[in-house]
């Protein structure tokens, strides 16, 4: 059953988003694999945990759970230079090492996400940002009845084919409206007045947060074809100026990126979250 006052924060990190959701008046179930971050958040949110407004789930969401459920732990690559880049995906860890960061391999508990949905209920909003495992959470929805009204994931930025597969998966789950939300400079975003989701907070976002969600997001919702066309333009910038872009390290490329970022008042290319709205939701603000 859908719980309209419940949010799942899958990829808690330091609690940048959970803090916002709690202040908005939502109950939160937050997932984090890094035990050091879990301990920080236990201290940061001790009152909300004691009050029952927040539940912390420690471990990694993964697609490697065997049928007999005997696997109790999995390797987790804890990034020593950027804690947001921790991952269970070995190829993601190697990619991050190419960006001159270091990893430490530890063992963390395995989480069966579909069982968590059954245990805690279907959230109104499902935020997912777990470095390579976002679509595992989406696929878990195929095993149960009910859908969150809104979902966001950190969208694929290296392979356009994988980006299309993400949108196709959303579509198969009944999500028909989308927004591509630039994540760089999130600390400058403000919630609308009046707020359409939960309490009015005048919240100051921390960099690294996912930001606004649902009816509070700016801009028009787009259909599948429209969001695909937008991502084609975004991927052109990724291919030329992204982490491994062909122009990123060339002098003219750096000059163009800096000038374009200044003129457009947003980072080029930055990175994006895909927000999806289920077909059952009626949005009066379109």
Image: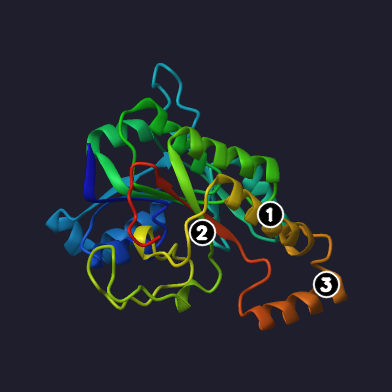
Residue 91 percent coordinates (x, y): 66, 42
Count of marks placed on residues: 3
Q: Which of the 4 quarters of the picture holds residue 90?
A: top right
Q: How far apart are marks 1 and 3 (CA)?
A: 23 Å
Query: Mark 3 falls on what kind of element?
Result: helix
Residue nearest the observer in this picture, 241 or 40:
241
Residue 223 percent coordinates (x, y): 52, 48
Colouring chosen for the image of the structure: rainbow
Residue nearest the observer in this picture, 77 or 12:
12
Q: Specify which label sits upstream in the sequence, 1 or 2.
A: 2
Q: Which mark is residue 196?
A: none
Up-down relation of residue 151 to residue 205 (above or below): above
Q: Which residue is drawn at 30% across and 34% down?
A: 146
Residue nearest the observer in this picture, 209 or 59:
209
Residue 41 percent coordinates (x, y): 32, 60
Residue 73 percent coordinates (x, y): 43, 34
Classify mark 1: residues with Cα within 10 Å, few (<14), some (14-19) or many (20+).
few
Residue underneath mark 3: 253
User: Given this view, does label 1 or label 2 mark the residue nearer the observer?
Assistant: 2
Residue underneath mark 1: 97
Q: In this view, does 178 lie to the left or right of 255?
A: left
Q: Specify which label sits upstream in the sequence, 1 or 3.
A: 1
Residue nearest the observer in this picture, 225 or 50:
225
Query: Mark 1 falls on what kind of element?
Result: helix
Residue underneath mark 2: 84
């Amino acid at each position: 059953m859908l719980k309209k006052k419940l949010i799942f924060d899958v990829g808690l990190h330091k609690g940048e988003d959970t803090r916002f959701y709690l202040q908005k008046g939502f109950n939160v179930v937050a997932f984090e694999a890094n035990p050091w971050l879990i301990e920080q958040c236990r201290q940061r949110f001790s009152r909300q945990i004691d009050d029952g407004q927040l539940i912390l789930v420690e471990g990694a969401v993964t697609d490697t759970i065997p049928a007999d459920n005997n696997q109790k732990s999995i390797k987790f690559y804890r990034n020593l230079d950027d804690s947001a880049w921790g991952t269970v995906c070995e190829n993601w860890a190697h990619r991050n090492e190419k960006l001159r960061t270091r990893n430490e391999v530890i063992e963390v508990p395995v989480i069966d996400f579909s069982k968590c949905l059954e245990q805690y209920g279907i959230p109104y909003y499902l935020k997912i940002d777990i470095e390579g495992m976002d679509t595992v959470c989406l696929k878990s929805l195929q095993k149960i009845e009910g859908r969150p009204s809104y979902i966001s994931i950190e969208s694929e930025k290296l392979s356009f084919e994988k980006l299309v597969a993400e949108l196709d998966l959303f579509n198969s789950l009944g999500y028909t409206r989308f927004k591509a939300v630039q994540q760089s400079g999130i600390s400058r975003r403000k919630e609308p007045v009046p707020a359409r989701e939960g309490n009015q907070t005048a919240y100051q976002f921390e960099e690294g947060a996912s930001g606004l969600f649902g009816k509070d997001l700016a801009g028009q919702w787009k259909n599948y074809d429209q969001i695909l066309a937008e991502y084609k333009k975004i991927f052109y910038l990724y291919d030329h100026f992204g982490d491994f872009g062909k122009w990123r390290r060339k002098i003219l490329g750096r000059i163009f990126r800096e000038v374009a970022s200044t003129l457009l008042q947003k980072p080029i290319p930055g990175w994006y979250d895909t927000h999806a709205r289920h077909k059952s939701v009626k949005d009066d603000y379109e």
